[in-house]
Image: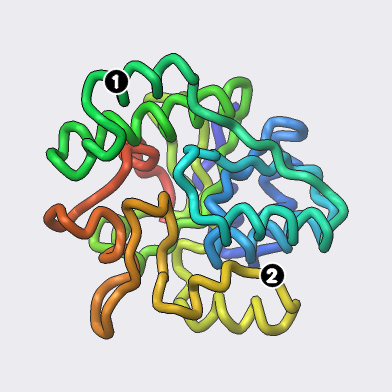
Amino acid sequence: MQLSEDIINKISNEPLEKALKSITDLFPGKVVFSSSLGQEDQVITDAIYRNDLGIDIFTLDTGRLFNETYELIERNTARYKKSMKIFFPEAADVEEFVLAKGINSFYESVENRKECCHIRKVKPLNRALAGAKVWITGLRAEQSLNRNNMPMLEWDDVRLLYKFNPLINWRYNEVIDYINKFKVPYNPLHDKGFLSIGCAPCTRATEPGEDARAGRWWWEGSQKECGLHVAAVKIGK
């Protein structure tokens, strides 16, 4: 099903909960949300679960996450009485990579780091998205320069589905206001300067004035992504 420009513009201008319902009504049973359990993702999780929207939520367990992240998964289950799906990397892939290059070889080169991300994140994501027509993310434009020009709704030309970024135009203070209003559980590392939280060896707290993604793979240069959000064709605003 191809969405018309009118429908894309309509959804792009709707408030969060209504936009989520609209996209679900268009693709019933084919909408999934990938949560990295950051503050933005917790906002979307709350909107989905609190309104019983019937959207499957999943997360990727790379095997290198902070313990606080695992604890948040348990807190979500206790709060919403629903369990998100968890996708893991293929054990053989991890074993082969670690044997050949070392447990922390991602510090040694960008190539090693991207290979590690591909094994632990990209391949499990592709399995999680199998059969979906819409992939919801918690991306926001102000998180990094890479995301400044991302539209709310775009076509993923590799995975052949729509990628829906309902918070793309939200400011950070709007995320915090929502969390406070609905008392949404969140990772306590955010209160310690971790604005963006990924794998423990690859994440540090950010300094004042740094963008939200500066703490990810901090030993590399700018314009850093893990490979999950690099293949899309812009179709909306």
Q: Where is residue 53 in the image (x, y as percent from the top left)?
A: 80, 50
In this view of the protein, can residue 6 be seen by the observer?
Answer: no
Q: Where is residue 204 in the image (x, y as percent from the top left)?
A: 32, 65
Which of the image's four quarters has the C terminus? Answer: bottom left
Q: How far apart are marks 1 and 2 (CA)?
A: 38 Å
SS of the residue under disc 2: loop
Mark 2, Cα crowd under 10 Å, few <14 / some 14-19 / many 20+, is some
Between 155 and 101, the one lying in front of the other is 101
Residue 104 vs 99, above or below: the answer is below
Q: Position of residue 148 (x, y in %)?
A: 29, 62
SS of the residue under disc 1: helix
Q: What residue is disc 1 on?
A: 99
Instruction: Looking at the image, tell me whether mark 1 or mark 2 is earlier in sequence order.
Output: 1
Between 179 and 21, the one lying in front of the other is 179
Which of the image's four quarters has the N terminus? Answer: top right
Residue at image position (25%, 53%) is 217
> Which quadrant of the structure image shows residue 110?
top left
Q: Disc 1 vs disc 2: Cβ atoms closer than 8 Å?
A: no
> Which quadrant of the structure image shows residue 210?
bottom left
Residue at image position (30%, 57%) is 216
Residue at image position (56%, 28%) is 129
In this view of the protein, can residue 104 be seen by the observer?
Answer: yes
Q: Residue 185 carries which label?
A: 2
Count of marks overlaid on the render = 2
Residue 202 vs 112, above or below: the answer is below
Amino acid type of the residue tagged 1 in the rendering: Leu
Q: Which mark is residue 112?
A: none
Residue at image position (58%, 49%) is 35
Amino acid type of the residue tagged 2 in the rendering: Pro
Query: Is residue 33 shown left or right of residue 228?
Result: right
Mark 1, Cα crowd under 10 Å, few <14 / some 14-19 / many 20+, is few
Mark 1 or 2: in front is 1
